[in-house]
Image: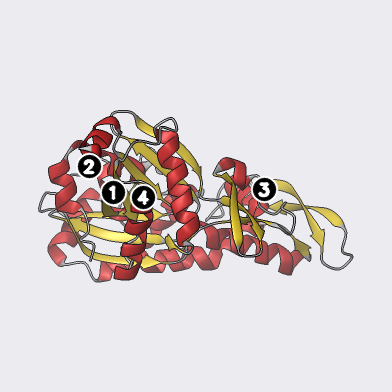
Amino acid sequence: MFSWLSGLLSNDLAIDLGTANTLAYARGQGIICSEPSVVAVSEHGRERKILAVGTEAKEMVGRTPGAIRAIRPIKDGVIADFEITSAMLTYFINKAHNRKYLVRPRIVICVPPCITSVEKRAVRDSALAAGAREVFLLEEPMAAAIGAGLNVTEPTGNMVIDIGGGTTDVAVISLAGIVTSNSIRVAGDKLDEAIINYVKRKHNLLIGERTAEIIKITIGTCMSRGPVRTMEIKGRDLVAGIPKMIVLSSEEVREALTDPVHQIVEAVLHTLERTPPELAADIVDRGIVLVGGGSLLRDFDQLLREETKLPIVRGDDPFTAVAMGAGKTLESLDLLREVALPVP
């Protein structure tokens, strides 16, 4: 009776548990929360205390004293720290329900296609520990396709590329299932890392993750098109050991991103090679749908168009497509049970 009552009082949630950002969708309300997947923890011996979650914790990255750590519990799309992930999920569930604690929602959580059975159980158990009454796991490309407005239950081929923070997932979908897929651990974080390494190697300047992300968003590009943009960046001089400012150009950022961008393109081409011919014919007609925060890198859609010779359609809101798709399955339990992953 208590379980039935707590379920009646709760809003079912869909959570895009990303390496960089976590988005929460409440049934009947839409996206209610979008915050970084970061938890600030105070450590004294074996005792750990949660200080902040989400945006507040992200502000602490690179600025914490020795006893405080800003942890990203999701690494490469999967759980790296079970306890911290449970605490983060609890925070998002409570926020969705205005911190009412006597609620137990049904939760849909999006995971990458490369997830193992052990990792599936870890995601499910962390959600149950956070207060969920029922947990469904949904592959991110499937959720992205639904969020982009594709009819995934038809016997036609739809190709989706989801570039997140930790993984890039490429999948061909037909009849509510993934026919062929490829998942590589090269995405937004690797792009930031490439910028950090380039600036260190070329300018002897050490910059942080947040600075690299700002550079990527502001002047990052995949192709030499249009006027060259520049940006002033600050960091620590590796030779003199003092703070220093330099001017970085968009051409330099393009050069820095060449290798990870090439790996993503190769993953797309490899998936196309393994696509059955009938579905490949559908993709020629329908094009490839591009979603995920990493897909917003300037001219990335144009680069893919040149490499694949196929139409590239960027989603209306690439950043929220996965969360929106998972949210849509909450409105149709029959569809959710059809597309959800079995959990061992």
Upstream in the sequence, badge 1 or badge 2? 1
Tag 4 residue: 290
In the image: residue 219, left or right of residue 99: right
Q: Which quadrant of the view contains residue 170?
A: bottom left
Upstream in the sequence, badge 3 or badge 4? 3
Instruction: Tell which of 253 and 343 is nearer to you.
Output: 343
Amino acid at circle 4: Leu
Kindly report the distance in space between the C-alpha atoms of the residues bearing marks 4 and 1: 13 Å
Instruction: Classify mark 3: helix, strand or loop.
Output: loop
Question: Which numbered disc, 2 or 4, marks the residue closer to the eye?
Answer: 2
At 73% from the left and 66% from the top, the residue drawn is: 200
Amino acid at circle 2: Thr
Amino acid at circle 3: Met
In the image: residue 306, left or right of residue 160: right
In the image: residue 316, left or right of residue 236: left
Tag 1 residue: 143
Tag 3 residue: 60
Pointers 1 and 2 in contact (C-beta within 8 Å): yes
State whether residue 205 appears in this view.
Answer: yes
Question: What crowding class fits label 3: few (fewer than 14 Cα within 10 Å), some (14-19), or many (20 or more)?
Answer: some
Instruction: Classify mark 4: helix, strand or loop.
Output: strand
Upstream in the sequence, badge 4 or badge 1? 1
Q: Is residue 240 above or below residue 69?
A: below
Instruction: Classify mark 2: helix, strand or loop.
Output: helix
Tag 2 residue: 329
Question: What crowding class fits label 1: few (fewer than 14 Cα within 10 Å), some (14-19), or many (20 or more)?
Answer: many
Q: Is residue 275 above or below residue 337?
A: below
Q: Is residue 114 above or below residue 221?
A: below
Kindly report the distance in space between the C-alpha atoms of the residues bearing marks 3 and 1: 31 Å
At 72% from the left and 69% from the top, the residue drawn is: 201
Q: Quadrant of the C terminus?
A: bottom left
